Amino acid sequence: MMPDAFKFDPREGILEILDQRGIPFEVSYLKCSTSDQVAEAITSMAVRGAPAIGIAAAFGVALDALRGRDVLEAIRVLGATRPTAVNLFWALNRMRSLADLPGDRMADAMVEEALTIWREDLAINRAIGRNGADLIPHEGVVITHCNTGSLATGGYGTALGVIRSAAEQGKRIRVFVDETRPRLQGARLTAFELFNLGIDFTVICDSMASYLMSRVKVSCVIVGADRVAMNGDVANKVGTYSLAVGAHYHRVPFYVAAPLSTFDPNCPSGDRIPIEERDPDEVRCVMGSELFPPSYPIWNPSFDVTPGDLISGIVTELGVLRPPYEASLARALDLWKAR
Ligand code: MRU
């Protein structure tokens, strides 16, 4: 059974966050009653995935509002947790817009807003799944990277939501899951989700994807996004760019699935997206075991940027956006703002 990524108890004002670091071997929850605890859960990657950290951060602000703490300080601290996924800042801006309400009304409004962000994300994921399902044929073979499922979102998933939706239509699908070094979100989390969903999957090392495409007829690659720039460049988990280059060489369609809250209207191109660099020990150690001595130099960018030129389509809740992206993204964002 799939554990929920979050549980919220409105009477106690407690957010329980599934500690994804233990998956697939251990299911446990972190009980959070303050924004600091939520911020720690985000930086330590107990909760991760662009939509999920937005939802967690929204609840973090609401928890402090319930306890009469300084919500602007909460927004500042939560906004400093991870720099790349724009959903975090989008969710915090929604919470900030309520910060001028008087005390008790503000707390109720913030709890309601956090719940709304969560519920909306689930509905958006289902729409992304419906809109993208046709991209995967019956008996299709798909490669995915990192984890974009119910653990990374408000539920259901983005890229994994597309795969789920196609499977729910009765299509037989085989999924190859990049293990996703350094933190293994593919091998640990996506494989866990696919196992629970009963969808056929095989885990591969990231470096095997191009060879796989040269040997097997892969129908498409589908991944998520942490930030989409207005020219269609996409920041996503490091390794995505290599996968897109390999797909291009082998003429395999490469799709991104993301909610419009992942699009950044203030970011004209991918070179303006801030890329998080994380602790070198994430590369040096796997699940607590050292691979080499601490004196060896390491570079650990957590994300990379795939140029829009390599992307065949971006699946959103409003449909599949196609190149040229300057035009299709601007139109989609206008429609989104006008809702
Ligand atoms: O560092 P992570 O695990 O937060 O990175 C997650 C990803 O890169 C996902 O692909 C992205 O957030 C999309 S989640 C629907």
Image (cartoon, rainbow, N blue to C red):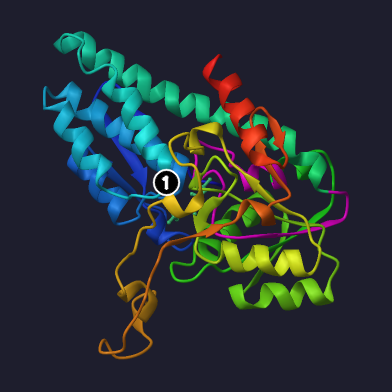
Residue at x 84%, y 42% (from the top left corner): 170
- The verdict on label 1 being within 8 Å of ligand 1 is yes
Question: In which quadrant of the rendered view does residue 320 lie?
Answer: top right
Instruction: Using residue 308 as the reference point, say whether residue 137 is left or right of it.
Output: right
x and y percentages locating residue 239 in the rendered image: 55, 67
* Near-viewer residue (153 or 94): 94
Residue at x 67%, y 54% (from the top left corner): 309
* Near-viewer residue (323 or 246): 323
Which is the main secondary structure of the residues drawn in magenta? loop
The residue to which callout 1 is attached is: 85
Amino acid under disc 1 = Ala
Q: Residues within 10 Å of mark 1 (few under 14, many from 20)?
A: many
x and y percentages locating residue 176 in the rendered image: 70, 64
* Near-viewer residue (191 or 241): 241
Secondary structure under the numbered disc 1 in the rendered image: loop
Residue at x 65%, y 40% (from the top left corner): 325
Question: In which quadrant of the rendered view does residue 14 lie?
Answer: top left
Q: Specify whether residue 13 is in view.
A: no
x and y percentages locating residue 29 in the rendered image: 34, 47
Q: Is residue 324 above or below residue 235?
A: above
Q: Is residue 105 above or below residue 281?
A: above
Is-magenta flag for residue 45? no
Instruction: Using residue 195 as the reference point, say whether residue 175 is left or right of it.
Output: right
Q: Specify whether residue 119 is in view.
A: yes
Q: Which residues are magenta?
A: 137-163
* Near-viewer residue (312 or 169): 312
x and y percentages locating residue 152 in the rendered image: 49, 46
Is-magenta flag for residue 147? yes
